Each structure stands twice: as C-alpha cells, then as structure tokens.
C-alpha cells in the first residue's frame, strides 16, 4: 500500500476537488494556493467567478453532475480517485514539484510502494535491450522491488511483463479509457489481474497528446527511488524521464551499449554525465542503498503566505501593476517579489492567483514564479 496519510475526503469534498482540478488553468500549484487562500475546494469554486473576472479570463468549473459521472465511470473500470494526503496516495509523489492533487488509480493494494524502481527505454528496442530489461525487472522483482514504467512499446512493455508476478505499476498518459498504445490494453489488464496498479492524473476520455507524455514521465520518476535507462536515443522521452529523476533528487542508472547503435547514445551519454553504470540488478540495488525521497527533498513546499488569508480585502490595481512590472520570464522567489514591490503577502497571493488563472504566469517547483513564455 501507499504511504500513510492524514486525511480522507468526504464524497462531497472529493467531488469539489475533482471539479477544481478539472478547471482550465488550475494546475497543482494553483490548486493548493486556492485551498490555502479559501480554506476548501468548495469555497474556492464559489470565489472563482470574482477571481477570474479580475484576471480577465472567464473560467468554467465543471458541473457537479459531470464530476459525479466521472467518478461513476471510473468505478466501472475498477478505478478510484485518490487525493494527496489520503492513505492510498503514493508517498514518494509527495516529494516532487507539482504533485497531482488527485490521482486516478486501479489495483495496487498489495504493492510495496516504498520500494519501487522505474525502468524506461526505447520503443524500438533491440533484442539485447529487451533481454536485459527482462533480466533486470525479474531480478529486481525477486528482491522485493516494484517496477514502474509508462506502458509504452519496447522497453516499458518488457519491464511490465517481466514483473507481473512480483509487482508493477503502469503510469498512463491519457485517461483510463484511452490506453496508449491500444496494443497494450491486454497488458494493462494483465497488470491488474496480477495485483499491479494503473494510475493517471488525466480524466476519462482524455486522448494522450505529445505534451502529456513528459507529464506522465514525471510521475514515473516521482513514484520511483531511482530510474534505469536501458536504451535511449540522443533525444528521447527516456532521457526526459532521467532528467526529471535528477530534478526530483532520484538516482539515475543506465545500461551501456554499443557506440555504433543509436539506441545506446542516450544511455552512454548519461553514464558520461555521472549516471551509475548497470550490468545487473545488484548494481541498481547497491546504488539505491538507503534511497528515500524524504531524506533530502529537493523542492520546498509551494509558497504560501504566513497567517490567515481568508476574508482579506482584494489588492489594489496599483499593486497589480507593480507586480507585473517586477515580473519577467526569469523565475524568481515570491518572497523576493514581496521585498521588491512592498506588496503584502496576502495581496501577493491573490494577485499571483489571478495572473495564474489568466495564464500570464507559470511556477517553477512551487516557490519560483515568472511570466509565461509566449
């Protein structure tokens, strides 16, 4: 099971969280800022019309019935919504930037979510790469590790299949009813039938797009103590996963390959840059040692003002202009903006919320904010 949580949402709260999460321009950081500002998802939803009006962008919160339909639809797939802070929420995800407030999950009741290793690699994998993947995943499973991957063709599929009996998690880029590639739908069923897990942050009916795969990759690495790259070209999604793992303070491993094989260029480059070279599963186990994302979390929690903010008067237009003048596309700490502009913390929070809802700013980690690149 996942790490121990502190709260359990009521059905009404879960619907309100879902409605807020599914609203355009409300990402994980903005979601938590809204909850901090207004105290609950219900109150945030009630405040959004005024907030979005001041932001100059009308935001449409999905209706209660649509949220209820999604929850009912998920139940038909044997899936459930898990909120951050609940007992089933994967503990390792609490230590990544922009952790999803809500995850859709199926299965996983018997998995050891604490001892998990990501295995990723090329879709057009070589026979040798597939064999190495099967060996690594099988041996890691035999040592009690759960294998995490992205259900893609090639290395991902081989890793999942080799770990079916010992435990594997597949992270989807789309909704539960839009598994990609379609040829891996039977594999997804096999994972659940063997006690593994499927999870995604995307809604039902969501067909994965190109930009959704890096989002998925950050969860593959975030769920893992470390990530193993078996085969990867110079510019590939697997290298994105490795970079994300480094940003999340996870261990990175790579299997070396022939310099003549383009599929080995990425892994070999990672080794040159300091990734641990892997020849067998024991190399990975030794490299993980006492790895735990909680030991040195790279990112601070999302910025929030100290003290009570509920019921504070809205900021003045002059403060908005001062903030816009101080911002640039280079991310800066919110506390630095407060010092530069003289804007009170509670007013700064509201202004940043409004600009975020309008699509004018974006967050890095959760402590840094800058103007969105156009």
Image: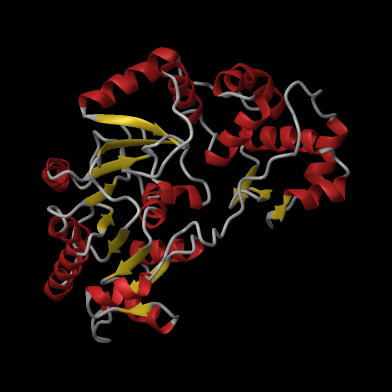
Residue 323 located left or right of residue 150: right
**In the displayed image of the protein, which residue is found farthest to the bottom?**
259
Above or below, 79 relative to 10: below
Residue 312 located left or right of residue 292: right
Residue 186 located left or right of residue 281: left
Q: Which colour scheme appears in the figure?
A: secondary structure
Q: Residue at the location (55% across, 35% down)?
A: 25
Q: Residue at the location (35% across, 61% down)?
A: 237
Q: Is residue 374 visible?
A: no
Q: Residue at the location (44% across, 27% down)?
A: 8
**In the displayed image of the protein, which residue is found farthest to the top?**
65
Report x, y in % for residue 69: 33, 17
Along the line of sight, which residue is nearer the eye, 341 or 141? 141
Report x, y in % for residue 306: 75, 39
How many dots with numbers?
A: 0
Q: Is residue 180 visible?
A: yes
Report x, y in % for residue 126: 15, 72
Above or below, 249 relative to 43: below
On the rendered image, what quadrant is the N terminus found in? top left
């Amino acid at each position: 099971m996942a790490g121990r949580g502190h709260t359990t949402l009521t059905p009404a709260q879960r619907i309100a969280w879902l409605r807020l999460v599914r609203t355009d321009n409300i990402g994980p950081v903005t979601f938590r800022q809204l909850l901090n500002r207004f105290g609950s998802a219900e109150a945030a939803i009630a405040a959004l019309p005024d907030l979005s009006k001041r932001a100059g962008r009308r935001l449409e919160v999905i209706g209660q019935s649509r949220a209820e339909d999604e929850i009912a639809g998920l139940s038909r797939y044997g899936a459930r919504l898990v909120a951050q802070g609940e007992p089933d929420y994967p503990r390792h995800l609490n230590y990544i930037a922009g952790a999803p407030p809500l995850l859709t999950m199926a299965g996983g009741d018997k998995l050891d979510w604490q001892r998990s290793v990501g295995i990723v690699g090329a879709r057009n994998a070589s026979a040798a790469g597939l064999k190495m993947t099967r060996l690594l995943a099988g041996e890691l499973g035999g040592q009690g590790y759960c294998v995490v991957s992205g259900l893609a063709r090639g290395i991902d599929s081989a890793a999942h299949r080799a770990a079916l009996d010992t435990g594997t998690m597949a992270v989807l880029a789309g909704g539960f009813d839009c598994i990609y590639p379609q040829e891996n739908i039977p594999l997804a069923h096999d994972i659940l039938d063997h006690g593994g897990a499927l999870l995604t942050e995307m809604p039902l009916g969501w067909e994965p797009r190109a930009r959704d795969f890096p989002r998925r990759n950050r969860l593959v690495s975030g769920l893992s103590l470390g990530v193993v790259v078996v085969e990867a070209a110079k510019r590939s999604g697997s290298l994105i996963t490795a970079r994300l793992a480094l940003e999340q303070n996870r261990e990175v491993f790579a299997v070396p390959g022939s310099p003549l094989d383009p599929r080995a260029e990425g892994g070999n480059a990672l080794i040159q840059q300091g990734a641990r070279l892997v020849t067998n599963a024991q190399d990975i186990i030794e490299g993980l040692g006492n790895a735990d994302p909680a030991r040195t979390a790279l990112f601070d929690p999302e910025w929030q003002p100290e003290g009570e903010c509920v019921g504070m008067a809205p900021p003045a237009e002059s403060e908005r202009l001062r903030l816009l003048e101080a911002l640039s596309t280079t991310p800066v700490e919110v506390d630095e903006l407060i010092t530069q502009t003289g804007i009170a913390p509670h007013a700064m929070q509201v202004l940043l919320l409004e600009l975020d809802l309008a699509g004018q700013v974006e967050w890095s980690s959760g402590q840094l904010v800058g103007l969105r690149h156009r």
